[in-house]
Amino acid sequence: MAKPPAAQKKLGKYELIRELGRGATSTVWLGSDPFARRQVAIKVATPEILKDPVKGRLYTHLFLNEASLVGKLNHPHIVQIFDAVVTDTLSYIVMEYVAGSTLETVCQPGRLLPVDKVVEIGFKCSRALDFAFRLGITHRDIKPANILLTPEGDIKISDFGAALVSRTERTQVSGIGSPAYMSPQQVQELPLDHRTDIYSLGVVLYELLTGQKPFQGSSNYNVVYQIIHHDPPPVDQLNPEVSPALAAIVTKAMARELESRYGSWEAFSRDLAEVARQHPPAQARELPDTARFDILRALPFFRQFPDVELWEVLRFASWTQVPPGQVIMKDGEEGDFFCFLIQGELKVTKQGRMLYLLTPGDCFGEMAVILQQKPSRSADVSSLTEAVIVRIPGQALTEASTACRMHFYQAFLEVLTERLRLSNQRLAAL
């Protein structure tokens, strides 16, 4: 069991395919889980590190820390941890395999991402870290190397080995993390909470927007001194494409004093979403995930949906911009989708007679999904003005997670109850 994985083709039940990367303390392998039938990434502690009388204890702690999170961090923008083995001679963590690279590849001048993409990355990270925070977890080592960038341009946060876990009984180890991304409180080894991650994410955004770290020095000591005593140049001074509003967000996230820094992930992500809304694309289909998430989150229908399920909805929903006078649903046709009106006005008619108007936030066409036999539409729905609609196929809802479907049906019930109430009011007024 203690034999190095390089000499084996298997590690426990996992088949080793190829080495993905190697560092001073661990090696990451691409593996295969024959039971779950999926590829996985397996981080294996270097045997020599485990034998070291000082470092062995530290890295065993880090592996135990990450192992305690198995099955807990189920979020679309966090690398899932599936399994873990931690012994004196062999320690490894089995994680979701994410193809692609890390944000390190887009932090250099000449390789920077568009500003709107950086805002989207910051928003997704803030929502993911808020999810972890609500589980009592503070990452403590947020940096570009720990944020994976998929070939599709999505992100996933990895490496929770240094995390503060509020419900653990293990003593937390100090001095963990990368100095350039540490908050003033962290470099001074003061008590920490989620605001240290807010600072670190601010540093990541700074680097993504400018191609340089906010504090640079010839030694870690020099960098730490600057973190404690100085403020970096605002990002809009280094990158003219950055708006003053976005620069202010990064500055607030990186405030040295806790009282001046964002106090919550919600406030941080809300400001990022506002910046995204200030520069809307010409077409609805081009809306970034940041704006789409924020729009759906504001709809009463999705009030009870946790973030994880709202991200799931975004994966199977399509956004369409329609001109005035376009028929969206036709009386008598079989229905296999339902919609939400995001912007504009729609009219519902029956044989040319107006029944009612639909306004932003309204759900329509859902009876085709609620009634399993796919009934025909009972009225025409067409656009009175230019409109933006979100379309959800009935099949996608059928294949959604159980929790997501449950929240949809709960919300459908609220919609139908409200419609019945309004119908009764109209009848009583006759």
Image (spheres, rainbow, N blue to C red):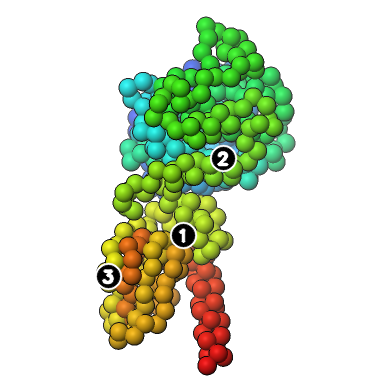
Q: Amino acid at mark 3?
A: Gly
Residue toward you, 148 or 85: 148
Q: Farthest bottom residue?
A: 430
Left or right, residue 74 beside residue 261: left
Residue in the picture at 33% in, 25% down: 111
How busy is the neighbourhood of tag 3: few (under 14 within 10 Å), some, or many (20 plus)? some
Residue 128 visible? The answer is no
* Residue, disc 3: 325
**CA gap, disc 2 to disc 1?**
28 Å
Q: Which residue is mark 2?
A: 268
Q: Estimate how packed mark 1 is, as few (under 14), some (14 to 19) or many (20 or more) residues with alpha carbons within 10 Å.
A: few
Residue toward you, 48 or 338:
338
Q: Between disc 2 and disc 3, whose residue precedes?
A: 2
Q: Amino acid at mark 2?
A: Phe
Q: CA distance from mark 2 to mark 3?
A: 40 Å
Q: Secondary structure at mark 3?
A: loop
Residue 410 rendering spot, x and y as whole percentages: 54, 70
Q: Residue at x 38, y 21 (%)?
A: 108
What residue does disc 1 label? 401
Q: Nearer the viewer, residue 64 or 163?
A: 163
Q: Residue at x 56, y 85 (%)?
A: 425
* Residue situated furthest top in the rendering: 218
Tag 1 or tag 2, which sits nearer the N-term? 2
- The image shows residue 289 at horizontal and vertical percentages of 41, 47
SS category of the residue bearing label 1: loop
Task: Between label 3 and label 1, give the one nearer the viewer.
Answer: 3
Judge left or right: residue 43 versus residue 153. Answer: right
Residue sitting nearer the eye, 359 or 161: 359
* Residue 226 in view, yes or no: yes
